[in-house]
Amino acid sequence: MSKLFSAKLSGASGREYSFDVFSAGIDFNEVGAVYAFLAVPWPQFTDFKVLYVGKANALQRRMGEHRQPGEKWDEAKALGVNAVGAKLVTSESERRDIETDLIRAYFPPLNKHQNALAQIAESLGAYPKTPAGNMLTNGLLGPLGIAPNTGTNYLGGFRFWK
């Protein structure tokens, strides 16, 4: 299984972060990363919703924890999760800073314990979407705006998926 496309998520600080986006069933390796559960409208890949932002020092283990019955993945499925974005980040403090910046920007509905505003946004059905036109970073392919897979499987010497 390979990367679907690359996306830029902008934090509340205005800083942009590049994420590789994979189908929801991806099996990640044990790497330190910031990740996001996404609801991506296929096939246009625009205006996707950020449902949850998290950080992990062992991404495979953390995703396994989320997929246990009654955990975040069940809630994410109810909200339409169909993709996971991941950004390799080796520093724990940098992972924490990026996670916080993105939560403050998108108010993900599943980050309720970290962001009280997400509860309000969820109740109104109005949590932020990604800005169209700023999402794809691998270039556009055809009228659907699908980014081609460049074959780049490694970031910083670590492969994200098996």
Image: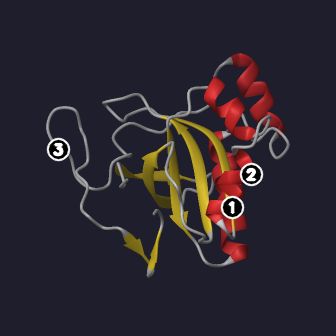
Callout 3 amino acid: Leu
Please say if 87 is above or below 37.
below
Q: Say which residue label 2 marks.
A: 65
Q: Amino acid at mark 2?
A: Glu
Can residue 42 be seen? yes
Q: Give the Cα separation between the discs numbered 3 and 2.
A: 36 Å
| 7 horizontally vs 103: left or right | left
Residue 141's disc number: 3
Q: Are marks 1 and 2 in contact (CB under 8 Å)?
A: yes
Is residue 77 positioned above or below 92 on the image? Answer: above
**The C terminus - image quarter:** bottom left
Q: CA distance from mark 1 to mark 3?
A: 34 Å
Label number found at residue 61: 1
Q: Is residue 28 above or below residue 108?
A: below
Mark 1 or mark 3, which is nearer to you?
1
**Numbered disc 3: secondary structure:** loop
Amino acid type for the residue under numbered disc 1? Arg
Identified at 44% across, 49% down, the residue is 22
Mark 1–mark 2 distance (CA, rounded to whole Å): 6 Å
Colour style of the rendered protein structure: secondary structure
Tell me the element at label 1.
Answer: helix
Residue closer to the observer: 32 or 100 = 32
Q: How many C-alpha atoms fall within 10 Å of the one at disc 3: few (<14), some, or many (≥20)?
A: few
